[in-house]
Amino acid sequence: HELASASTSYDDVEDNISYLVEVSDHCCASCQSDIPLKLSIDGNLVKRHQAEDRELCIVKKALKNGLLIQPTTPSLAEYAKMSHELRLVDGTIFWARDPSDLLPVIPHSLLEVIINQAHAVGHTNTQATVEMLRKVCYFLWMWRSTHEIVIRCPKCALNVRPDPVLPMQQVNRASAPWEVLHIDIVSYGPAHFLTIIDSFSKYLLWEFLPSTKSSWIATMLMRCFIKMGPPGMLIADNARNLGAPEVVK
């Protein structure tokens, strides 16, 4: 629990002393708002909303009468798959994670309220919010449903750091053919090819590579340059074999 400084003064103690008292809420560091210290689920509220949910009423009727859940909708199909894990207790549907741990099944009409309540406990990301929800309740497609609501949190959006602006890079433009060449290795299964593209004309040359070792790359580049002449500049990615001393030499 976070502790706050109390302004209460007492006659029998010295002045200029800060007294620490426990508070019921603590302040979120990211959004500077008071948030609850724990997540609680109102069982009566869940029961009332379950009674108003058409699909959960079908599930409730099937569980009560020992019938199979007919998979007529995507939600009912999911409930049918897990029917052996569902329990009906005092008119409320629970998911039996294990025999001693019954979690209330949250109807669709309550999802946004419950998820926002869980997300407010620290304004955590989707995974952390789901892990908190799994301790106290259950609903279909938990991760997807939670993510759709968490990403819309306005307070989190205000505190997201923008991606850093990458420094501008100089672009080498060619003013004549064979002045600037781009080289790369293209693999198709076990076959490897050295591709050479002229930046000015977009002319493509390629050489078959028996291996992607730097020695073979240097050999194929020399074969190409013997035919076409040496270029003014070679541009390659950061692959180790393309930047090896043998190739650079």
Image (cartoon, helix red, strand yellow):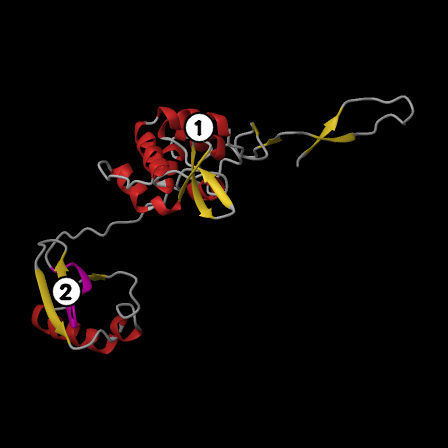
Image quadrant for the N terminus?
top right
Q: In x, y percent, where is residue 153? A: 42, 30
Residue 201 appears in the rendering: yes
The verdict on residue 64 being magenta is no
Residue placed under numbered mark 2 in the picture: 195
The kind of secondary structure element at disc 1 is helix
Occupied quadrant, residue 191: bottom left
The residue closer to the viewer here, 238 or 115, is 115
The residue closer to the viewer here, 229 or 201, is 201
**In this picture, is 194 found above or below 106?**
below
The kind of secondary structure the magenta stretch mainly shows is strand
Q: In x, y percent, where is residue 106? A: 41, 33
**In this picture, is 129 found above or below 158?**
below
Residue 47: which numbered mark, if any? 1
Q: Is residue 101 left or right of residue 65?
A: right
Q: In x, y percent, where is residue 85? A: 39, 46
Q: Please provide the residue range marked out in magenta.
A: 178-195
Q: Are marks 2 and 1 in contact (CB under 8 Å)?
A: no
Residue 167 appears in the rendering: no
Q: Is residue 196 left or right of residue 167?
A: left
